Image (tube, grey):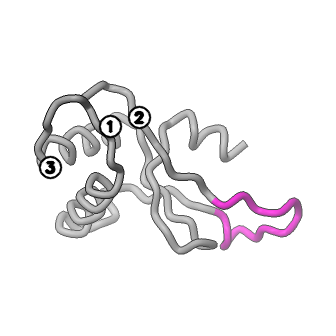
Amino acid sequence: MSDSFDSSESLAQPAPGAASASSLPVEIPLSALSDEAASAVLESYVLREGTDYGVEYTLEMKVSRLRKQIEAKKAHLIYDPTSETISFLTANEWRKWRQ
């Protein structure tokens, strides 16, 4: 598994002048979630992301890697109220989206 984070999710882009502050995606720190909820969110993403690394990695290894990327600010947990979904974005993707 590489150190880079691969995000296949995209956030709904607000129409110019139409988005209110309450409809914009927001970053959710893992520390805002209980340990159980944070683990469930990470596991859910890892199970649906479907990346083939060419080698078998356990669920625990993938979750641990994602958690470390979030802690290092290389990936961000994002909630999109428009679609009512969560996504993970790389730091660059999140920075570009906010501009």
SS under mark 2: loop
In whole angstroms, how far apart are the C-alphas of marks 3 and 2? 20 Å
Q: Which residue is mark 2?
A: 74
Crowdedness near tag 1: few (<14), some (14–19) or many (≥20) residues, C-alpha within 10 Å: some
Residue at image position (51%, 52%) is 9
Give the residues drawn in magenta, as a range.
12-24
Q: Which residue is mark 3?
A: 59
In whole angstroms, how far apart are the C-alphas of marks 1 and 2? 5 Å
Q: Which residue is mark 1?
A: 69
**In the image, residue 8 lies at what x, y percent?**
49, 46
Q: Amino acid at mark 1?
A: Gln
Residue at image position (39%, 35%) is 5
Quadrant assignment for the C terminus: top right
The mark that comes first in sequence, 1 or 2, is: 1
**In the image, residue 14 lies at what x, y percent?**
76, 62
Crowdedness near tag 2: few (<14), some (14–19) or many (≥20) residues, C-alpha within 10 Å: some
The mark that comes first in sequence, 3 or 2, is: 3
The answer to whether the residue labelled 1 contacts the one labelled 2, judged by CB atoms less than 8 Å apart, is yes
Quadrant assignment for the N terminus: top left
**In the image, residue 39 lies at what x, y percent?**
21, 60
Q: Nearer the viewer, residue 10 or 91?
A: 10
Q: Is residue 34 left or right of residue 69?
A: left
SS under mark 3: helix
**In the image, residue 12 lies at what x, y percent?**
66, 61
- Above or below, 79 relative to 99: below
- Above or below, 22 relative to 44: below
In whole angstroms, how far apart are the C-alphas of marks 3 and 1? 15 Å
Residue at image position (42%, 37%) is 6
